[in-house]
């Protein structure tokens, strides 16, 4: 009795305990569901994908007179993902008939205006646009193409995406997703028990996981809210959240979220999310322009982005894509004939294995750094900014080619010191101070050490023009002034004695400045710099655009200062821009996700030095190509193209530099070894040929600054600096002087001599290649057209 | 040894009876038979009338510069700068945007034009006017100076550039300099 009583009590207390436990469990379940519900609803309602800033290249401007051939234009169009198709009846298509191209330009939201999609007719005559009209035949003065997407600034965890709105999604995509991944999507409540059961059976039979029973909603939940661990608890959580999501939101919302969220591939550190970016990543065009076979491929990739990577495993991916197409026909999404036709098409992905087609890490790095001055990191990686950069994709490609071809040529020379040679290039448009291309190294798409921005090397003779600028600025020197190319010994602050020498160990005695600079004479330059004053020379570095002057040691005169290629570009840009300093920009404009313009670096100019001094220096730098260390490049440049520039070689041939410009472009080239070992190259034999190769392959204009008002041209003798006649054989050079400059007349070939008399003089015997040029500079091979 | 030919040449010269008349200057036009002549870039139009140049002043160091004495010489005038149709359209667009107060838009339009015609002084003046609207007066002046440097010989454009500079100086209270710039603008507009 007592026993039974006790057992009854026990039973009762057990029941009670059970009830309490059940209650507790229920409470826990309710709390869990409530918590999940709160989380799902809040996160999904206010959903904002972290949207990395998207970076675009500069758009191609079309206008009558633009230098562009029909062939080059079609190249540009295909780079932008335009396809040659029919009568060009929808955006993203064009039709070429000889010299006439009809195209349908895509709509694009620029920083300053929303340009609608529009049809254009462009007529070419050789290398120029001669007619630009709309379909009614009305002239269009100027129009931009939609620019090339060159990358995004994604955060450390590497998630990148382009969000698309439902109207940018071809209806075929959701239909195909449903047909292949989740047939009951329109009716289920988040989970599909039958599908799970079916999957379970298939998997048990196969002995491995072959089929997922997840609905699109579950896949979305997994990707959006959960990490990738696969435990039973996770599965339950995922199912509950899917049900919650379905009860709270419309099917259309869920589908749109899925399309933007799902993971679709890997590009190095960057994870490709959403169909919007996937379309760009695989096909180089917007999602709205994808055809059936492309949509089928994207749907294939969803299943396993690394297993069905169309670039790495094209065969099995094609097989699966065709299976998807077959399924679409079977399930009535498309007509069987359509599926048949689509199956015959290739995968159609852009090449460039494992890399998106347009990947310019060195340039993007500069964009990122310039943006960081105005924006916090999160704003760049999450806020959905659109960045309009200054990159010129066509020129960037040419720069990459020119540099790698020249580095290859050097390596093939078989010289030991040329093995593993590296290089870098920076290209700007001087007048607007825009950086339009950066090549970071031999492998331009390698995202590593950014030589153009971070490498600091002695600039060698690139420093000389600054000495001459200080000299001209002092008002005590002209290009004809005489300086002594004679030995010099200088006591340094540390007590050491500095005894520089000329490249070829020769002494030339008194020489005019024009010769001293064009032939890059070390001793003449040091003597000049000491006479002008080290502080004055150091100041010119700041005038031309550096943040601070290098230490004012005598060795600075010969380029001991360590500078990066981009810093060199900044200084030389000022010389190329008629003495106006413009801070180099890689960003033109930034807009937020609603299209509102935000802060961006502005075009600025400021006069860095007196116009006369800059003009005289620029004219002497032109002579570098006529008589000095740049002369070997002359034969590979277009004969009428006027350019100016300077070679640079550091001690023991460790660095080979060339910085030079035309009217439209400044190019800075460096070659050397990352470990700073000697290269055996001078500026003339290493960097110059790469510079010339690029300069001659682009469409550019002559460097023809206007002579300042108070100056005039006079002829002087290159060797003596005395005033002479243009008829005097070979040695007469025309240079600018301020009115009334006193010049000593040449005794041997004076200014007024007649052509007949002048003809009696023999050409000068002196060689024209100076210290930076090798004694016998290797010939520059003709550049490819 | 490289200079060895020089005495011979001098002898030849004397033998040929060449008179050494300095500064009987005849402006070199073009290249003649002389193949090495550099293209003389930037010299713009060839100077057609060359007035006398005073012979070397006694005691003056050769190669040095004497104070630029005002010389009665005129650089040839060039026709006023004009805009290409593309630039014209973009300048028109920028002006509309300015009127609407859309200064970033106007900047973008003008920069587009500048990329097409970076050497057109009119565009730099237009850019300077925009900087005035943005109250960025130092940049307005700098753009004016840039326009001056690219319009040597073009009085009309230079007059406009000086007017811009004068306005920017005025806006900063630099009245005497502004007056000076204005006088230059007026003087140039007379031509």
Image (cartoon, coloured by chain):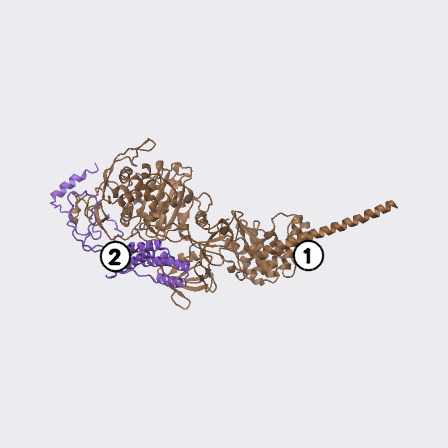
The chain under label 2 reads B
**Residue A271 as seen in the image, left or right of residue A524:** right
Q: Visible in this render: residue A132?
A: yes
Q: Which chain is purple?
A: B
Name the spot of residue A328 as percent of width and height, x first. Answer: 59, 60
| Residue position for label 1 | A194
**Residue A636 as seen in the image, left or right of residue A716:** right
Q: Which chain is brown?
A: A
| Residue position for label 2 | B153
Q: Visible in this render: residue A690?
A: no
Residues A736 and A579: in front is A579
The answer to whether residue B9 is above or below residue B126 is above
Task: Report the residue that reaches farthest toward the right.
Answer: A1
Of labels 1 and 2, the one closer to you: 2
Task: Report the residue that reaches farthest toward the bottom.
Answer: A136
SS at badge 2? loop
**Residue A365 as seen in the image, left or right of residue A532:** right
Same chain for mark 1 and mark 2? The answer is no
Name the spot of residue A625 as percent of width and height, x first. Answer: 29, 46
The chain under label 1 reads A
How far apart are labels 1 and 2 at the CA level? 86 Å
Residues A441 and B16: in front is A441
**Residue A197 as seen in the image, left or right of residue A65:** right
SS at badge 1? helix
Name the spot of residue A700 as percent of width and height, x first. Answer: 34, 53
Local packing at callout 1 (Cα closer than 10 Å; few below 14, some 14-19, many 20+) is few
């Amino acid at each position: 009795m007592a026993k039974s009583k006790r057992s009854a009590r026990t039973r009762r207390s057990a029941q009670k305990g059970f009830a309490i436990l059940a209650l507790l469990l229920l409470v826990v379940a309710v709390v869990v569901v409530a918590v999940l519900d709160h989380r799902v609803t809040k996160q999904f309602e206010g959903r904002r994908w972290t949207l990395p800033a998207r970076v675009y290249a500069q758009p191609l401007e079309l206008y009558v007179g633009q230098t562009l051939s029909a062939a080059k234009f079609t190249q540009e169009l295909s780079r932008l993902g335009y396809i040659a198709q029919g009568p060009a009846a929808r955006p993203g298509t064009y039709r070429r008939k000889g010299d006439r191209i009809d195209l349908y330009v895509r709509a694009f939201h620029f920083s300053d205006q929303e340009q609608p999609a529009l049809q254009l007719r462009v007529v070419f005559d050789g290398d120029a646009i001669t007619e630009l009209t709309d379909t009614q035949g009305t002239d269009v003065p100027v129009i931009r193409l939609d620019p090339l997407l060159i990358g995004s600034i994604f955060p450390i965890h590497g998630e990148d995406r382009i969000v698309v709105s439902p109207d940018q999604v071809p209806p075929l995509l959701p239909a195909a997703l449903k047909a292949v991944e989740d047939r009951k999507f329109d009716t289920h409540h988040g989970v599909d028990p039958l599908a799970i059961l079916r999957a379970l059976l298939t998997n048990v039979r196969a002995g491995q996981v072959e089929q997922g029973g997840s609905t699109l909603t579950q896949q979305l939940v997994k990707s959006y809210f959960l990490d990738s661990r696969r435990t039973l608890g996770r599965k339950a959580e995922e199912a509950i959240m899917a049900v919650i999501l379905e009860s709270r939101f419309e099917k259309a919302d869920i589908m749109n979220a899925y399309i933007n969220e799902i993971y679709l591939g890997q590009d190095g550190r960057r994870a490709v999310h959403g169909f919007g970016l996937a379309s760009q990543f695989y096909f180089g065009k917007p999602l709205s322009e994808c055809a059936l076979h492309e949509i089928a491929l994207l749907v294939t990739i969803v299943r396993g982005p690394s297993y069905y990577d169309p670039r790495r495993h094209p065969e099995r991916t094609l097989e699966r894509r065709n299976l998807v197409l077959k399924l679409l026909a079977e399930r009535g999404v498309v007509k069987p004939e359509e599926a048949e036709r689509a199956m015959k098409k290739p995968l159609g992905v852009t090449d460039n294995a494992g890399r998106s087609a347009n990947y310019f890490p060195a340039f993007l790095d500069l964009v990122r750094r310039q943006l960081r001055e105005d924006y916090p990191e999160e704003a760049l990686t999450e806020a959905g900014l659109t960045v309009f950069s200054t990159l010129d994709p066509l020129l960037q490609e040419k720069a990459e080619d020119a540099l790698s071809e020249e580095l290859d040529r050097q390596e093939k020379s078989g010289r030991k010191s040329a093995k593993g040679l590296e290089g870098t290039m920076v290209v700007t448009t001087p007048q607007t101070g825009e950086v339009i291309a950066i090549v970071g190294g031999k492998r331009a798409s390698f995202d590593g050490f950014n030589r153009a921005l971070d490498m600091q090397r002695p600039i060698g003779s690139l420093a000389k023009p600054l000495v001459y600028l200080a000299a001209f600025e002092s008002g005590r020197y002209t290009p004809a002034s005489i300086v002594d190319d004679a030995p010099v010994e200088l006591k340094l602050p540390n007590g050491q004695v500095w005894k520089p020498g000329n490249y070829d160990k020769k002494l030339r005695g008194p020489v005019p400045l024009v010769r001293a600079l064009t032939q890059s004479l070390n001793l003449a330059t040091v003597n000049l710099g000491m006479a002008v004053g080290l502080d004055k020379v150091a100041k010119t570095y700041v005038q031309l655009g550096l943040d601070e002057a290098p230490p004012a040691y005598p060795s600075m005169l010969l380029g001991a200062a360590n500078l990066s290629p981009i810093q060199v570009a900044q200084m030389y840009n000022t010389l190329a821009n008629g003495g106006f300093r413009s801070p180099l920009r890689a960003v033109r404009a930034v807009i937020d996700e609603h299209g509102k313009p935000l802060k961006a670096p502005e075009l600025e100019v400021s006069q860095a030095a007196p116009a006369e001094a800059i003009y005289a220096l620029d004219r002497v730098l032109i002579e570098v190509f006529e008589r000095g260390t740049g002369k070997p490049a002359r034969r590979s440049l277009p004969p009428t193209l006027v350019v100016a520039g300077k070679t640079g070689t550091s001690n023991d041939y460790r660095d080979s530099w060339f910085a030079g410009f035309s009217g439209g472009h400044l190019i800075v080239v460096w070659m050397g070894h990352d470990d700073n070992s000697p290269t055996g190259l001078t500026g003339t034999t290493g960097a110059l040929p790469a510079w010339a190769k690029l300069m001659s392959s682009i469409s550019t204009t002559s460097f023809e600054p206007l002579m300042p008002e108070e100056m005039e041209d006079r002829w002087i003798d290159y060797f003596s600096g005395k005033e002479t006649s243009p008829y005097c054989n070979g040695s007469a050079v025309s240079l600018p002087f301020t009115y009334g400059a006193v010049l000593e007349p040449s005794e041997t070939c004076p200014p007024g001599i007649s052509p007949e008399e002048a003809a009696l003089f023999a050409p000068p015997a002196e060689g024209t290649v100076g210290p930076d040029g090798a004694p016998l500079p290797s010939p520059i091979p003709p550049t490819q057209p | 040894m490289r200079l060895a030919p020089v005495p011979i040449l001098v002898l030849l010269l004397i033998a040929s009876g060449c008179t050494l008349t300095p500064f009987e200057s005849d402006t070199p036009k073009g290249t003649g038979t002389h193949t090495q002549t550099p293209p003389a870039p930037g010299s713009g139009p060839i100077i057609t009338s060359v007035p006398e140049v005073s012979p070397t002043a006694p005691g003056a160091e050769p190669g040095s510069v004497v104070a630029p004495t005002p010389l009665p010489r005129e650089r040839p005038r060039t026709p006023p700068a004009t805009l290409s149709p593309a630039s014209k359209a973009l300048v028109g667009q920028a002006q509309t945007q300015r009127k609407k107060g859309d200064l970033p838009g106007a900047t973008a339009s003008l920069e587009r034009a500048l990329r097409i015609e970076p050497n057109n002084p009119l565009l730099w003046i237009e850019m300077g006017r925009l900087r005035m609207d943005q109250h960025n007066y130092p940049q307005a002046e700098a753009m004016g100076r840039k326009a001056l440097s690219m319009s040597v010989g073009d009085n009309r454009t230079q007059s406009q550039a000086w007017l811009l500079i004068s306005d920017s100086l005025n806006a900063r209270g630099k009245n005497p300099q502004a007056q000076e710039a204005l006088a230059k603008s007026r003087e140039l507009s007379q031509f």
